[in-house]
Image (cartoon, grey):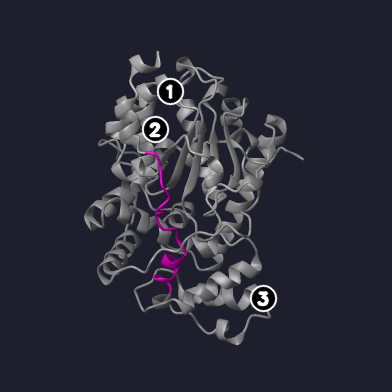
């Protein structure tokens, strides 16, 4: 059966792998980072050193600074608290300056008219899949091409289910030409944005049909790719090792007969993402707002799952300093259903919240991958001519 729109959720058999609990030292650093961000009164609207206009964090910015978000920045900085503080602040300022929330579907739409970026399905660890097809490049090199990727990243994040905060990137270079691929400068810009402002978001990058000029490009930008990202790159392996065939595009060897029709896909995908984000924000407000709420609770796919995630908070709490208001979460438990068991209706204190989410995140996979270093060492421009 032909499909024109994204899958709404992963297969029931596809589950995120939970992370182990934080150590006592990691928990302390997390608590300190939470407190630091909560005490931010205002930040500049741009990174320009001459910028004098400041403003406090608005609702969207506070809802962006979740428990998982802070843990991602701590992991990315190898748990150096001062570095994590600067990075979180820097990303908030960058999001303002870059205009991430102002990138509209109508402005970005011409970039995706050919279907060069597609959100479709989930991998075995419930990561939403973002497909890139360089051969479908339909516009001249410009800043909007990079804005397009940022727009797609924001949408694929909306598609993440509870317990998963990373994505799978699937890239098919078949029929691609050197003129349709990004320049080295664009590549470096994209890497900087991904590694600086979307840390720990890439779960797997699966690449197939790689031509010689892409290997040459990889050789040039490889020194700029951080070591943790390199470990997530997989080249020329069967994609169904990582993504169930039922939700894998047939181009990659799957059973999903997806056909890109811009009129059918674009608005449907944007509407689905917007609806998920709307639900996310409604729950954020229901739980009392503020810094450090749980993405697993906010991203629950339905009311039953929402109640389950709330219950997990209480069951896995360990008395750390939390960031979600107790009245807010207690009200959410009480109001979400009149049939909630009595033990769920007990007041959930703020100290019971902060630790709960770490058991719902994905751990680094041990799946074997073709060594990037081996490829880059063995493939040369002369060999591929």
Which one is earlier in the sequence, the residue at label 2 or at label 3?
2
Q: Which residue is mark 1?
A: 182
Nearer to us: label 1 or label 3:
1
The magenta segment = 353-370
Nearer to us: label 2 or label 3:
2
Q: Which residue is mark 2?
A: 190
Q: Residue 326 versus residue 255: which sits nearer the camera? A: 255
Task: Answer whether residue 368 is magenta in the image.
Answer: yes
Q: Which mark is residue 337?
A: 3
The image quadrant of residue 372 is: top left
The kind of secondary structure the magenta stretch mainly shows is loop
Q: Between marks 1 and 3, how big is the CA–CA gap? A: 51 Å
Residue in view at x 57 percent, y 63 percent: 283
Q: Which mark is residue 306?
A: none
Where disc 1 sits, the SS reads loop
Quarter of the figure that contains the C terminus: top left
Q: Position of residue 274 (x, y in %)?
A: 61, 47
Quarter of the figure that contains the N terminus: top right
Residue in view at x 53 percent, y 38 percent: 152
- Indicate whether 149 appears above or below 71: above
Task: Answer whether residue 121 is magenta in the image.
Answer: no
Q: Dots 1 and 2: beta carbons under 8 Å?
A: yes
How many labels sit on residues? 3
- Label 1: few (<14), some (14–19) or many (≥20) C-alpha neighbours in 10 Å: some
- Label 3: few (<14), some (14–19) or many (≥20) C-alpha neighbours in 10 Å: few
- Label 2: few (<14), some (14–19) or many (≥20) C-alpha neighbours in 10 Å: some
- Indicate whether 199 appears above or below 295: above
């Amino acid at each position: 059966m032909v499909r024109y729109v994204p899958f709404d959720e992963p297969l029931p058999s596809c589950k995120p792998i939970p992370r182990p609990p934080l150590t006592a030292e990691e928990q302390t650093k997390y608590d300190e980072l939470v407190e630091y961000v909560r005490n931010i009164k205002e930040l500049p609207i741009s990174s320009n050193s001459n910028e004098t206009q400041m403003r406090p964090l608005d609702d969207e910015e506070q809802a962006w600074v979740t428990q998982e978000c802070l843990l991602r920045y701590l992991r990315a900085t190898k748990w150096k608290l001062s570095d994590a503080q600067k990075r979180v602040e820097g990303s908030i300022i960058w999001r303002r300056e870059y205009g991430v929330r102002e990138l509209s579907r109508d402005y970005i739409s011409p970039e995706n008219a050919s279907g060069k970026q597609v959100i479709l399905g989930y991998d075995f660890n419930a990561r939403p899949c973002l497909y890139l097809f360089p051969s479908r490049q339909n516009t001249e090199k410009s800043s909007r091409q990079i804005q397009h990727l940022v727009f797609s990243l924001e949408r694929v994040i909306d598609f993440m289910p509870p317990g998963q905060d990373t994505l799978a990137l699937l890239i098919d270079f078949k029929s691609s030409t050197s003129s349709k691929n990004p320049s080295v400068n664009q590549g470096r810009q994209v890497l900087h944005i991904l590694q600086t402002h979307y840390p720990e978001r890439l779960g797997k990058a699966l690449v197939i049909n790689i031509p010689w000029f892409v290997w040459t490009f990889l050789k040039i930008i490889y020194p700029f790719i951080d070591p943790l990202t390199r470990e997530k790159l997989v080249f020329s392996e069967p994609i169904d090792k990582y993504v169930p065939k039922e939700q894998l595009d047939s181009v990659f060897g799957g059973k999903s007969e997806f056909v890109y029709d811009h009129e059918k896909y674009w608005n449907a995908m944007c509407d689905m993402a917007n609806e998920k984000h709307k639900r996310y924000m409604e729950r954020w407000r229901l739980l009392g707002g503020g810094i450090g709420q749980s993405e697993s609770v906010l991203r629950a796919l339905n009311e039953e799952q929402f109640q389950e995630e709330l219950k997990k908070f209480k069951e896995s709490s360990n008395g750390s300093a939390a960031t979600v208001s107790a009245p807010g979460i207690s009200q959410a438990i009480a109001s979400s259903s009149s049939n909630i068991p009595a033990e769920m209706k007990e007041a959930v204190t703020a100290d019971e919240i902060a630790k709960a989410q770490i058991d719902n995140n994905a751990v680094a996979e041990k799946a074997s991958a073709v060594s990037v270093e081996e490829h880059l060492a063995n493939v040369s421009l002369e060999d591929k001519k």
